[in-house]
Amino acid sequence: MAFPREAIAYDENFVRRVVLLVAEEQVELVVMGRPLSLAGSKTSSTDFADEMFVRLSGALDLPVVQHDERLTTTAAQRSLSSAGIKVKDHRSRIDSAAAVVLLQHFADSRNAL
């Protein structure tokens, strides 16, 4: 079953915390967002995500995949608003909600094949 986790702060212990969480939860696949511009070109955020992908791929003994995360935050904001959550409360939930959208898009793309 796919589900998002609370966002893990990026610091010097990030990779170690992800490795521990993956082991603890018996994760079989890690899906990472790959931020691109709306036109599909790379950005500075893409470069950072690509570097993190390489680091996590090397630290984990399971598949790590990147998936296009364009418009996931927008879709998450709409979903939170539709659920009656006030805009001022979106900030604390937006990353997890966007992760839900990302995972759903990833699952849908795999099922379409």
Image (cartoon, rainbow, N blue to C red):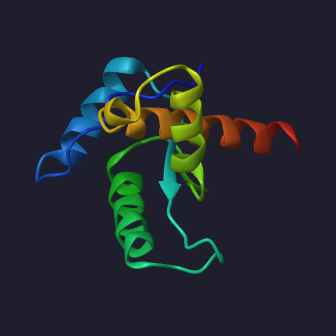
Residue 86 in which image quadrant: top left
Instruction: Name the residue at 21% across, 37% down.
Output: 17
Instruction: Name the residue at 67% across, 43% down.
Output: 106
Q: Nearer the viewer, residue 88 or 111?
A: 88
Residue 6 in which image quadrant: top left
Q: Nearer the viewer, residue 29 or 11?
A: 11
Q: Nearer the viewer, residue 10 or 90?
A: 90
Q: Horizontal and vertical percent for residue 104?
A: 66, 35
Q: Horizontal and vertical percent for residue 89?
A: 33, 30
Q: Nearer the viewer, residue 98 or 25?
A: 98
Instruction: Name the residue at 59% across, 59% down.
Output: 70
Can residue 64 be seen here? no
Q: Is residue 78 above or below residue 40?
A: above
Q: Hey, which residue is sitting farthest right in the picture?
A: 113
Q: Is residue 77 left or right of residue 61?
A: right
Q: Is residue 85 left or right of residue 104?
A: left
Task: Point out the image quarter for the C terminus.
Answer: top right
Q: Hey, which residue is sitting farthest left in the picture?
A: 12
Q: Horizontal and vertical percent for residue 109?
A: 78, 45
Task: Point out the image quarter for the N terminus.
Answer: top right
Q: Is residue 52 above or below residue 79?
A: below
Q: Is residue 48 left or right of residue 13?
A: right
Can residue 43 be seen here? yes
Q: Horizontal and vertical percent for residue 71?
A: 60, 55
Instruction: Name the residue at 35% across, 61% down.
Output: 52
Number of numbered callouts drawn: 0
